[in-house]
Amino acid sequence: MRVAPVEAFAGRIARLRQELAGATLDALVVTSLPNVAYLSGFFASAAALVVTTDRLALIGDGRYAETLAARARACAFVESIVIPPGVSYEDALVDVLSPFQGLRVGFEAAYLTVSRHRYLSERLTHRGWKAALVESVGLVERLRVRKDPWEIARLRDGAERLSAVTKCILPRIFAGRTEAEVAAELDSRLRSAGFERPAFDTIVASGPHSALPHARATARRIEEGDLVVVDVGGVLDGYCTDMTRTVTVGRAGERERRVIAQVAEAQAAAFAAVRPGGRPEAVDAAARHTLNDFGVGEAFSHGTGHGLGLEVHEAPRVTRARPGHDEPPLAAGMVLTIEPGVYFPGWGGARIEDDVLITDAGAEWLTDRRDP
Ligand code: ZN
Ligand code: ZN
Protein backbone atom coordinates (compact mmCIF):
# COMPACT_ATOMS: atom_id res chain seq x y z
CA MET A 1 0.00 0.00 0.00
CA ARG A 2 1.35 3.37 -1.02
CA VAL A 3 1.18 6.30 1.42
CA ALA A 4 1.24 9.99 0.47
CA PRO A 5 4.64 11.76 0.46
CA VAL A 6 5.78 13.54 3.61
CA GLU A 7 5.10 17.01 2.10
CA ALA A 8 1.44 16.08 1.72
CA PHE A 9 1.14 15.33 5.45
CA ALA A 10 3.06 18.48 6.36
CA GLY A 11 0.58 20.49 4.28
CA ARG A 12 -2.44 18.79 5.84
CA ILE A 13 -1.16 19.41 9.38
CA ALA A 14 -0.39 23.05 8.56
CA ARG A 15 -3.94 23.52 7.24
CA LEU A 16 -5.39 21.79 10.31
CA ARG A 17 -3.44 24.17 12.56
CA GLN A 18 -5.10 27.08 10.73
CA GLU A 19 -8.48 25.46 11.38
CA LEU A 20 -7.57 25.06 15.06
CA ALA A 21 -6.61 28.73 15.28
CA GLY A 22 -9.94 29.64 13.65
CA ALA A 23 -11.75 27.55 16.25
CA THR A 24 -9.58 29.05 19.04
CA LEU A 25 -8.30 25.61 19.98
CA ASP A 26 -4.75 24.92 21.19
CA ALA A 27 -4.97 21.22 20.41
CA LEU A 28 -7.25 18.56 18.95
CA VAL A 29 -7.70 14.93 19.95
CA VAL A 30 -8.40 12.98 16.75
CA THR A 31 -10.17 9.64 17.23
CA SER A 32 -11.77 9.14 13.78
CA LEU A 33 -9.60 6.46 12.14
CA PRO A 34 -9.89 7.92 8.61
CA ASN A 35 -8.90 11.31 10.05
CA VAL A 36 -5.87 9.75 11.79
CA ALA A 37 -4.89 8.10 8.48
CA TYR A 38 -5.35 11.38 6.60
CA LEU A 39 -3.12 13.34 8.97
CA SER A 40 -0.40 10.77 9.58
CA GLY A 41 -0.52 7.97 6.98
CA PHE A 42 -1.19 5.51 9.80
CA PHE A 43 -3.93 3.04 8.77
CA ALA A 44 -4.97 0.91 11.73
CA SER A 45 -8.00 -0.67 13.39
CA ALA A 46 -7.34 1.41 16.52
CA ALA A 47 -5.42 4.67 16.88
CA ALA A 48 -5.56 8.20 18.23
CA LEU A 49 -3.71 11.36 17.45
CA VAL A 50 -3.13 14.62 19.29
CA VAL A 51 -2.28 17.73 17.27
CA THR A 52 -1.06 20.88 18.99
CA THR A 53 0.51 24.04 17.58
CA ASP A 54 3.92 22.33 17.60
CA ARG A 55 3.42 18.62 18.29
CA LEU A 56 1.82 15.67 16.59
CA ALA A 57 1.54 12.62 18.85
CA LEU A 58 0.46 9.45 17.07
CA ILE A 59 -0.79 6.78 19.46
CA GLY A 60 -1.09 3.09 18.62
CA ASP A 61 -0.83 -0.27 20.36
CA GLY A 62 1.89 -2.91 20.26
CA ARG A 63 0.50 -4.69 17.18
CA TYR A 64 1.53 -1.60 15.21
CA ALA A 65 4.92 -0.90 16.82
CA GLU A 66 6.81 -1.42 13.53
CA THR A 67 4.36 0.66 11.47
CA LEU A 68 4.38 3.46 14.03
CA ALA A 69 8.18 3.55 14.03
CA ALA A 70 8.12 3.66 10.22
CA ARG A 71 5.69 6.60 10.24
CA ALA A 72 7.93 8.51 12.67
CA ARG A 73 10.97 7.77 10.46
CA ALA A 74 9.12 8.91 7.32
CA CYS A 75 7.77 12.13 8.89
CA ALA A 76 10.16 13.84 11.28
CA PHE A 77 7.28 15.82 12.85
CA VAL A 78 5.42 12.63 13.91
CA GLU A 79 6.11 11.52 17.47
CA SER A 80 4.94 7.91 17.74
CA ILE A 81 3.72 6.50 21.03
CA VAL A 82 3.34 2.74 21.45
CA ILE A 83 0.87 1.92 24.23
CA PRO A 84 2.38 -0.59 26.68
CA PRO A 85 0.48 -3.87 27.21
CA GLY A 86 -2.34 -3.50 29.74
CA VAL A 87 -2.72 0.27 29.20
CA SER A 88 -5.84 1.56 27.41
CA TYR A 89 -5.99 4.14 24.62
CA GLU A 90 -7.81 6.45 27.05
CA ASP A 91 -5.03 6.23 29.64
CA ALA A 92 -2.40 6.81 26.94
CA LEU A 93 -4.35 9.91 25.84
CA VAL A 94 -4.54 11.17 29.42
CA ASP A 95 -0.74 10.87 29.68
CA VAL A 96 -0.28 12.91 26.48
CA LEU A 97 -2.91 15.51 27.47
CA SER A 98 -1.95 15.97 31.13
CA PRO A 99 0.62 18.74 30.53
CA PHE A 100 -1.93 20.72 28.45
CA GLN A 101 -3.87 21.76 31.54
CA GLY A 102 -5.15 25.30 31.02
CA LEU A 103 -5.22 25.03 27.21
CA ARG A 104 -8.32 24.69 25.01
CA VAL A 105 -8.26 21.09 23.82
CA GLY A 106 -10.89 19.97 21.31
CA PHE A 107 -12.22 16.48 20.66
CA GLU A 108 -14.16 15.07 17.72
CA ALA A 109 -17.73 15.03 19.02
CA ALA A 110 -18.85 12.75 16.19
CA TYR A 111 -16.21 10.12 16.97
CA LEU A 112 -15.74 9.92 20.74
CA THR A 113 -18.33 7.84 22.58
CA VAL A 114 -20.03 9.27 25.64
CA SER A 115 -18.37 6.68 27.87
CA ARG A 116 -14.86 7.33 26.52
CA HIS A 117 -15.42 11.08 26.84
CA ARG A 118 -16.61 10.67 30.44
CA TYR A 119 -13.59 8.51 31.33
CA LEU A 120 -11.12 10.97 29.75
CA SER A 121 -12.74 13.94 31.50
CA GLU A 122 -12.68 12.21 34.88
CA ARG A 123 -9.04 11.17 34.57
CA LEU A 124 -7.97 14.66 33.40
CA THR A 125 -9.80 16.31 36.30
CA HIS A 126 -8.03 13.87 38.59
CA ARG A 127 -4.74 15.10 37.08
CA GLY A 128 -5.59 18.71 37.92
CA TRP A 129 -7.43 19.82 34.78
CA LYS A 130 -9.94 22.59 35.52
CA ALA A 131 -11.38 23.11 32.01
CA ALA A 132 -13.46 20.63 30.01
CA LEU A 133 -12.54 19.16 26.64
CA VAL A 134 -14.12 21.28 23.87
CA GLU A 135 -16.58 19.76 21.38
CA SER A 136 -15.55 20.16 17.76
CA VAL A 137 -17.14 18.91 14.55
CA GLY A 138 -15.75 18.45 11.06
CA LEU A 139 -12.36 20.20 11.42
CA VAL A 140 -10.39 17.46 9.64
CA GLU A 141 -13.30 16.51 7.36
CA ARG A 142 -13.31 20.09 6.05
CA LEU A 143 -9.75 19.54 4.81
CA ARG A 144 -10.46 16.08 3.39
CA VAL A 145 -13.25 17.26 1.11
CA ARG A 146 -10.85 18.71 -1.48
CA LYS A 147 -8.34 16.14 -2.61
CA ASP A 148 -4.68 16.95 -3.21
CA PRO A 149 -2.89 15.81 -6.38
CA TRP A 150 -1.62 12.62 -4.73
CA GLU A 151 -5.13 11.66 -3.65
CA ILE A 152 -6.58 12.49 -7.05
CA ALA A 153 -4.01 10.20 -8.67
CA ARG A 154 -5.05 7.32 -6.33
CA LEU A 155 -8.76 7.89 -7.04
CA ARG A 156 -8.13 8.10 -10.78
CA ASP A 157 -6.12 4.89 -10.70
CA GLY A 158 -8.83 3.19 -8.58
CA ALA A 159 -11.62 4.34 -10.91
CA GLU A 160 -9.77 2.96 -13.96
CA ARG A 161 -9.19 -0.40 -12.30
CA LEU A 162 -12.79 -0.57 -11.07
CA SER A 163 -14.06 0.22 -14.57
CA ALA A 164 -12.01 -2.68 -15.95
CA VAL A 165 -13.36 -5.06 -13.28
CA THR A 166 -16.94 -4.01 -14.02
CA LYS A 167 -16.43 -4.38 -17.75
CA CYS A 168 -15.23 -7.97 -17.27
CA ILE A 169 -18.11 -8.99 -15.02
CA LEU A 170 -21.05 -7.75 -17.08
CA PRO A 171 -20.84 -10.48 -19.76
CA ARG A 172 -20.57 -13.03 -16.91
CA ILE A 173 -24.06 -12.17 -15.62
CA PHE A 174 -26.31 -14.81 -17.16
CA ALA A 175 -29.42 -16.81 -16.36
CA GLY A 176 -28.78 -19.67 -13.93
CA ARG A 177 -25.98 -18.04 -11.94
CA THR A 178 -26.84 -16.85 -8.44
CA GLU A 179 -26.35 -13.26 -7.31
CA ALA A 180 -23.89 -14.53 -4.67
CA GLU A 181 -21.78 -16.32 -7.32
CA VAL A 182 -21.50 -13.15 -9.38
CA ALA A 183 -20.66 -11.11 -6.25
CA ALA A 184 -17.95 -13.60 -5.21
CA GLU A 185 -16.42 -13.45 -8.69
CA LEU A 186 -16.47 -9.64 -8.54
CA ASP A 187 -14.74 -9.62 -5.16
CA SER A 188 -12.05 -11.95 -6.40
CA ARG A 189 -11.53 -9.82 -9.51
CA LEU A 190 -11.22 -6.72 -7.28
CA ARG A 191 -8.30 -8.36 -5.47
CA SER A 192 -6.69 -9.45 -8.73
CA ALA A 193 -6.99 -5.87 -9.98
CA GLY A 194 -4.89 -4.70 -7.01
CA PHE A 195 -7.58 -3.46 -4.62
CA GLU A 196 -6.92 -4.03 -0.91
CA ARG A 197 -10.56 -4.90 -0.24
CA PRO A 198 -14.08 -4.14 -1.40
CA ALA A 199 -15.24 -0.70 -0.22
CA PHE A 200 -18.57 -2.22 0.93
CA ASP A 201 -20.53 -5.45 0.53
CA THR A 202 -20.82 -5.90 -3.23
CA ILE A 203 -24.41 -5.57 -4.46
CA VAL A 204 -25.75 -7.90 -7.15
CA ALA A 205 -29.52 -7.44 -7.24
CA SER A 206 -31.55 -9.27 -9.88
CA GLY A 207 -35.19 -9.23 -10.94
CA PRO A 208 -37.45 -7.93 -8.15
CA HIS A 209 -34.37 -7.50 -5.89
CA SER A 210 -33.17 -4.73 -8.19
CA ALA A 211 -35.99 -2.59 -6.73
CA LEU A 212 -34.09 -2.48 -3.42
CA PRO A 213 -31.40 0.26 -3.51
CA HIS A 214 -29.46 -1.49 -0.73
CA ALA A 215 -30.00 -5.10 -1.74
CA ARG A 216 -27.40 -7.72 -0.80
CA ALA A 217 -26.31 -10.51 -3.11
CA THR A 218 -28.49 -13.53 -2.30
CA ALA A 219 -28.86 -17.15 -3.44
CA ARG A 220 -31.47 -16.06 -6.01
CA ARG A 221 -30.83 -17.46 -9.49
CA ILE A 222 -30.69 -14.83 -12.19
CA GLU A 223 -33.44 -15.32 -14.81
CA GLU A 224 -33.84 -14.48 -18.47
CA GLY A 225 -35.29 -10.96 -18.83
CA ASP A 226 -34.15 -9.80 -15.37
CA LEU A 227 -32.80 -6.37 -14.66
CA VAL A 228 -29.56 -6.78 -12.71
CA VAL A 229 -28.00 -3.96 -10.67
CA VAL A 230 -24.30 -4.43 -9.89
CA ASP A 231 -22.88 -1.91 -7.41
CA VAL A 232 -19.24 -2.43 -6.49
CA GLY A 233 -16.50 -0.45 -4.79
CA GLY A 234 -12.81 -1.01 -4.21
CA VAL A 235 -10.22 0.42 -1.83
CA LEU A 236 -6.84 1.25 -3.38
CA ASP A 237 -4.10 2.74 -1.17
CA GLY A 238 -6.83 3.57 1.33
CA TYR A 239 -9.03 5.42 -1.20
CA CYS A 240 -12.53 4.26 -2.20
CA THR A 241 -14.08 4.20 -5.65
CA ASP A 242 -17.66 3.17 -6.31
CA MET A 243 -19.64 2.34 -9.46
CA THR A 244 -22.93 0.79 -10.52
CA ARG A 245 -24.16 -0.71 -13.77
CA THR A 246 -27.62 -2.02 -14.60
CA VAL A 247 -27.98 -4.64 -17.33
CA THR A 248 -30.73 -6.86 -18.66
CA VAL A 249 -30.25 -10.60 -19.03
CA GLY A 250 -31.00 -11.96 -22.48
CA ARG A 251 -33.38 -9.96 -24.62
CA ALA A 252 -34.32 -6.72 -22.88
CA GLY A 253 -37.98 -5.85 -22.51
CA GLU A 254 -39.22 -2.45 -23.69
CA ARG A 255 -39.87 -1.13 -20.18
CA GLU A 256 -36.47 -2.30 -18.92
CA ARG A 257 -34.67 -0.56 -21.80
CA ARG A 258 -36.66 2.62 -21.24
CA VAL A 259 -35.97 2.75 -17.50
CA ILE A 260 -32.21 2.33 -18.03
CA ALA A 261 -32.22 5.08 -20.67
CA GLN A 262 -34.11 7.44 -18.36
CA VAL A 263 -31.63 6.91 -15.53
CA ALA A 264 -28.71 7.44 -17.94
CA GLU A 265 -30.26 10.73 -19.04
CA ALA A 266 -30.72 11.84 -15.41
CA GLN A 267 -27.06 11.03 -14.76
CA ALA A 268 -25.94 13.09 -17.76
CA ALA A 269 -28.11 16.03 -16.62
CA ALA A 270 -26.61 15.87 -13.12
CA PHE A 271 -23.08 15.79 -14.53
CA ALA A 272 -23.84 18.85 -16.67
CA ALA A 273 -24.78 20.69 -13.45
CA VAL A 274 -21.43 20.00 -11.75
CA ARG A 275 -19.14 23.02 -11.67
CA PRO A 276 -16.79 24.61 -9.13
CA GLY A 277 -18.70 27.19 -7.10
CA GLY A 278 -21.98 25.39 -7.80
CA ARG A 279 -24.30 23.84 -5.24
CA PRO A 280 -24.58 20.11 -4.56
CA GLU A 281 -28.38 20.55 -4.35
CA ALA A 282 -28.38 21.87 -7.94
CA VAL A 283 -26.74 18.64 -9.13
CA ASP A 284 -29.36 16.62 -7.28
CA ALA A 285 -32.14 18.80 -8.69
CA ALA A 286 -30.91 18.26 -12.27
CA ALA A 287 -31.22 14.47 -11.91
CA ARG A 288 -34.55 14.77 -10.12
CA HIS A 289 -36.08 17.13 -12.71
CA THR A 290 -35.11 14.80 -15.52
CA LEU A 291 -36.75 11.82 -13.84
CA ASN A 292 -39.80 13.94 -12.92
CA ASP A 293 -40.14 14.91 -16.58
CA PHE A 294 -40.20 11.21 -17.46
CA GLY A 295 -42.91 10.73 -14.83
CA VAL A 296 -40.73 8.46 -12.66
CA GLY A 297 -39.46 11.04 -10.13
CA GLU A 298 -41.38 9.31 -7.32
CA ALA A 299 -39.31 6.18 -7.89
CA PHE A 300 -36.01 8.02 -7.25
CA SER A 301 -35.82 7.39 -3.53
CA HIS A 302 -32.29 8.45 -2.56
CA GLY A 303 -29.78 11.26 -3.04
CA THR A 304 -27.90 11.71 -6.32
CA GLY A 305 -24.43 11.11 -4.96
CA HIS A 306 -21.77 11.37 -2.27
CA GLY A 307 -18.14 12.30 -1.85
CA LEU A 308 -15.42 9.64 -2.13
CA GLY A 309 -12.08 9.42 -0.39
CA LEU A 310 -10.77 7.57 2.64
CA GLU A 311 -14.43 6.72 3.28
CA VAL A 312 -16.90 5.50 0.70
CA HIS A 313 -19.51 7.99 1.86
CA GLU A 314 -18.10 11.37 2.80
CA ALA A 315 -18.71 15.05 2.10
CA PRO A 316 -20.12 16.49 -0.04
CA ARG A 317 -23.56 14.89 0.07
CA VAL A 318 -25.33 15.46 -3.23
CA THR A 319 -28.95 15.52 -2.07
CA ARG A 320 -31.90 17.80 -1.66
CA ALA A 321 -31.28 20.64 0.81
CA ARG A 322 -31.62 19.28 4.33
CA PRO A 323 -32.43 21.69 7.15
CA GLY A 324 -29.53 21.90 9.59
CA HIS A 325 -27.04 20.33 7.16
CA ASP A 326 -25.16 22.98 5.22
CA GLU A 327 -23.09 21.43 2.46
CA PRO A 328 -20.08 23.41 1.23
CA PRO A 329 -20.21 24.70 -2.36
CA LEU A 330 -18.65 22.42 -4.96
CA ALA A 331 -14.96 23.10 -5.51
CA ALA A 332 -12.11 21.87 -7.68
CA GLY A 333 -10.51 18.79 -6.14
CA MET A 334 -13.75 17.27 -4.87
CA VAL A 335 -14.47 13.72 -6.00
CA LEU A 336 -18.04 12.50 -5.89
CA THR A 337 -20.41 9.93 -7.33
CA ILE A 338 -23.43 10.61 -9.53
CA GLU A 339 -25.84 7.73 -9.09
CA PRO A 340 -29.49 8.34 -9.86
CA GLY A 341 -31.79 5.31 -9.76
CA VAL A 342 -35.45 4.37 -9.99
CA TYR A 343 -37.07 1.54 -8.05
CA PHE A 344 -40.46 -0.09 -8.62
CA PRO A 345 -41.28 -2.48 -5.77
CA GLY A 346 -42.10 -5.99 -6.96
CA TRP A 347 -40.95 -5.27 -10.51
CA GLY A 348 -37.35 -4.05 -10.47
CA GLY A 349 -35.12 -1.03 -10.68
CA ALA A 350 -32.08 0.56 -12.28
CA ARG A 351 -29.17 2.65 -11.03
CA ILE A 352 -26.13 3.98 -12.85
CA GLU A 353 -23.21 5.31 -10.84
CA ASP A 354 -19.96 6.90 -11.92
CA ASP A 355 -17.23 8.87 -10.17
CA VAL A 356 -16.54 12.50 -11.02
CA LEU A 357 -13.62 14.84 -10.32
CA ILE A 358 -14.42 18.55 -10.10
CA THR A 359 -11.78 20.60 -11.89
CA ASP A 360 -11.15 24.32 -12.31
CA ALA A 361 -12.82 24.09 -15.71
CA GLY A 362 -15.84 21.99 -14.70
CA ALA A 363 -15.87 18.27 -14.14
CA GLU A 364 -14.42 15.07 -15.51
CA TRP A 365 -15.56 11.43 -15.30
CA LEU A 366 -13.07 9.19 -13.49
CA THR A 367 -14.85 5.91 -14.22
CA ASP A 368 -15.23 4.69 -17.79
CA ARG A 369 -18.74 5.49 -19.01
CA ARG A 370 -18.43 3.82 -22.40
CA ASP A 371 -21.04 1.11 -22.76
CA PRO A 372 -19.66 -2.38 -22.17
ZN1 ZN B 1 -22.22 2.37 -5.27
ZN1 ZN C 1 -22.26 5.27 -4.15
Image (tube, rainbow, N blue to C red):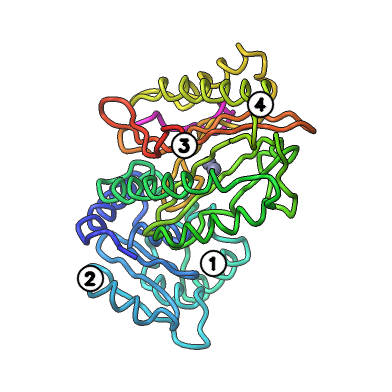
Dot 3 falls on a residue whose secondary structure is loop
SS under mark 1 = helix
Look at discs 2 and 1 and give the one toward the viewer.
Answer: 2
Q: Is the shortest distance between ligand 1 and the CB of mark 4 under 8 Å?
A: no
| Residue named by callout 4 | 256
- The residue tagged 1 is 121
Q: Is residue 23 visible?
A: no
> Does the magenta portion include 108?
no
Q: Are marks 4 and 3 in contact (CB under 8 Å)?
A: no
Count of marks overlaid on the render: 4
Where does residue 216 sit, x and y in percent of width and height?
68, 50
| Residue type of the residue flagged with mark 4 | Glu
Left or right, residue 365 beside residue 91? left
Residue 254, given in percent of the width and then of the height, sits at: 67, 21
| Residue range of the region highlighted in magenta in the rendering | 319-331
Q: Are marks 2 and 1 in contact (CB under 8 Å)?
A: no
Near-viewer residue (231 or 273): 231
